[in-house]
Image (cartoon, helix red, strand yellow):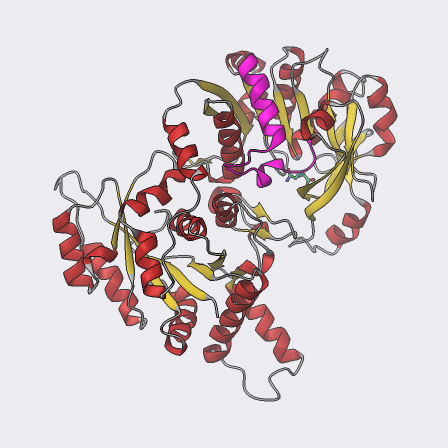
Amino acid sequence: MPKYIFIIGGVMSGIGKGITTASIGRILQDRGFKVTAVKIDPYINIDAGTMNPIEHGEVFVTEDGDETDQDIGNYERFLNKNIPSINYMTTGRVYEAVIRKERNLEFNGRCVEVVPDIPNEVISRIRKAAKESVSDIALIEVGGTVGEYQSLLFLEAARLMHLKHPKDVLFVLVSYLPIPNIIGEMKTKPTQYAVRSLNSAGIQPDFIIARAALPLDEPRKRKLSTFCNLDRRDIISAPDAECIYEVPLNFEKDKLGERILKKLNFKGKKSQNNDWRKLVNKIKNIKKSVKIGIVGKYFMSGRFTLMDSYISIIEALKHASWFYGSQSEIVWLDAEKYEKDKKYLKELRGYDGVVVPGGFGGRGVEGKIRAIGYCRKNKIPFFGLCYGMQLAVIEFARNICGLKKAHTTEIKPKTPNPVIDLMPEQKKKLRIKAYGGTMRLGGYNCLLQKNTISRKIYGKELISERHRHRYEFNNAYKDILMKKGLIISGINPESNLVEIIELPREKHPFFVATQFHPEFKSRPLNPHPLFREFIKSCLKK
Ligand code: GLN
């Protein structure tokens, strides 16, 4: 029987519940346990794929083709393994499954009710996730904040699991302790209320992860212990960290791993893996830095710049930079300004490299195309991801092959030169408005062509990478583009779809663009080879 640890948020969102969950997983994994992590999101959406990235952050794509919350990406990066679709659920997904079972007469004619049928479905999914990955310990992150109406049924599932197997289920509350400027003191009251709120759902936390700008001091620990009914040792200090990968080490300063194992009655093993610690030490001592511009559009929310839409790209850039003993300074470049005035393009010279990431729709597209053209002409290392690859093909077709009106049919359905076009199987889906979960998703093979940069970078012929797109390189234009010097270095062997394009080294220091999203597979201990090579070229510049 695996053990289950629920991670629940208190006080407010955005305080790092996902990183906390991933970090606890890392700590337990380093002690030799098999760990998996499950994310529950309380919204009705079946998956994250239909949500606006500015509002919700990045849509992370799993190997088996699910469009999930970005926290699944954190789990993969910290646990250094793939997390399957069964580990992600939403209210919509749970209700949909229960209703489908009801329609299939699987409840034998009885009345199907919110309680217990919804929590039961949640429990069976959690168990299945733990079983399928043969885990000793499953972590379950409950999205949202305690006290919210929409997470109640998930807390109810957690309570019921604990009721049945009290020795096998633990609860961790991730809370926030503000230090208001006018008071100048760290305040515990919001956390006390969060615990009360959790208590009213029938749950007493076993641990409090005390998120705050600063480490927790003794008086605060004592106060939380007394008022929240916990052993002082189970209140774990979690100050803001410079680097998220440091968080497991911070938790271990307060002996979180040891305390968890004690409560689970697992024989305490010493941490067996030093690689993580070594990496964090390395990162903290890096002085030099490489400057990367990301030309995108999903980062302004009112007056605030949010980076969540591109989180896997940011992490992949960091992993690769650290590999070469450098930090990465990432600057957000609004694609739309290059549409307003070409003169802004000159600023790209100030960057060691430029990334054009994935995206949808027409806003900023011409600006991105201009930026790509500028990088091509001025030999600035360029890395295009998904939409970034499609737009690089358009730029090449327009400016090198003279197909002045070349475009993607996503933006100009009637373009005379549809160099990027809808995949045939996608046409029907769009006609019947079947948008949700119907893109080309997840891992697909890619055959790398001989004597290409990509083949050399990967060091092998057959690779698999993750996808999320509807449009594709139109093979009718392959000959024209290749004749003018575009190299098609990766092709999906089953469908013949173009997966990677590049320009030869003699022409450009690094000009590579992929239809897939390599960023989803980069891990801190195992940076992605394409990102590594990109950064290497940037450092040379
Ligand atoms: N909008 C493009 C498509 O659907 C690219 C998608 C992406 O960048 N993820 O094909």
Which residue is painted at 57% across and 60% down in the image? 133
Say whether residue 416 is magenta. no
Quarter of the image where ligand 1 sits: top right
- Residue 367 seen from this side: no
465 or 393, which lies in front?
A: 465
Say whether residue 530 is magenta. yes
Q: Is residue 418 above or below residue 71?
A: above
Q: Is residue 282 above or below residue 428?
A: above
Tell me which segment is drawn in magenta. 514-541
The answer to which quarter of the image holds residue 359 is: top right
Q: Is residue 230 left or right of residue 275?
A: left
Which residue is painted at 52% across and 68% down in the image? 127
The answer to which quarter of the image holds residue 248 is: top left
Q: Is residue 14 left or right of residue 408?
A: left
Which residue is painted at 47% across and 67% down in the image? 2
Q: Is residue 157 above or below residue 376?
A: below
455 or 124, which lies in front?
A: 455
Q: Name the spot of residue 202 as percent of width and height, x first.
A: 31, 73
**So how many labels did they put on this image?**
0
Q: Name the spot of residue 242 as percent of width and height, x first.
A: 34, 33
Q: Name the spot of residue 374 as percent of width and height, x first.
A: 63, 15
Q: Is residue 187 left or right of residue 108?
A: left
